[in-house]
Amino acid sequence: MNETYNFLKEKTKVNFVSTVNGDKPSCRPFGDPILFDNKIYVITNKQKNVSK
């Protein structure tokens, strides 16, 4: 997990999360990933549609 996290954090700088918005794909940029409890998280605001 650390190797993947380090790659995302140090090599890519910006990561993208893809979701479906209705019947259309949507891709959003996200900043720094967070490593917590051996899991990788991206952070967003709970009012944004992507968090739903």
Image (cartoon, grey):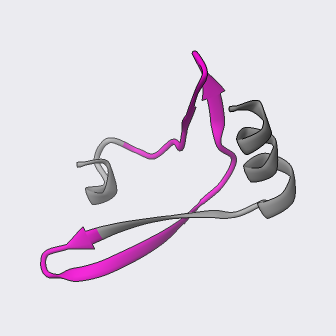
43 in the magenta segment: yes
| Residue 27 in the image, given as x and y percentages of width and height | 44, 74
Q: Quadrant of residue 16?
A: bottom right
Residue at left offset 45%, top offset 46%: 44
Report the number of discs. Answer: 0
From the viewer's side, name the closer residue of 5 and 50: 5
Residue at left offset 40%, top offset 44%: 45
| Residue 12 in the image, given as x and y percentages of width and height | 78, 62
Image position of 12 with respect to 39: above or below:
below
From the viewer's side, name the closer residue of 21 and 1: 1
Query: Which quarter of the rendered picture does the N terminus lie within?
Result: top right
> Taking 49 as reference, is 7 left or right?
right
From the viewer's side, name the closer residue of 48 and 13: 13
Residue at left offset 21%, top offset 73%: 21
| Residue 34 in the image, given as x and y percentages of width and height | 64, 34
| Residue 40 in the image, given as x and y percentages of width and height | 58, 35
Q: Quadrant of residue 38?
A: top right
**Which region of the structure is painted magenta?**
20-45
From the viewer's side, name the closer residue of 6 and 51: 6
For the view shown, which residue lies furthest in the bottom direction? 24
> Taking 47 as reference, is 41 left or right?
right
> Taking 34 as reference, is 51 left or right?
left
For the view shown, which residue lies furthest in the right direction? 10
Image position of 37 with respect to 46: above or below:
above
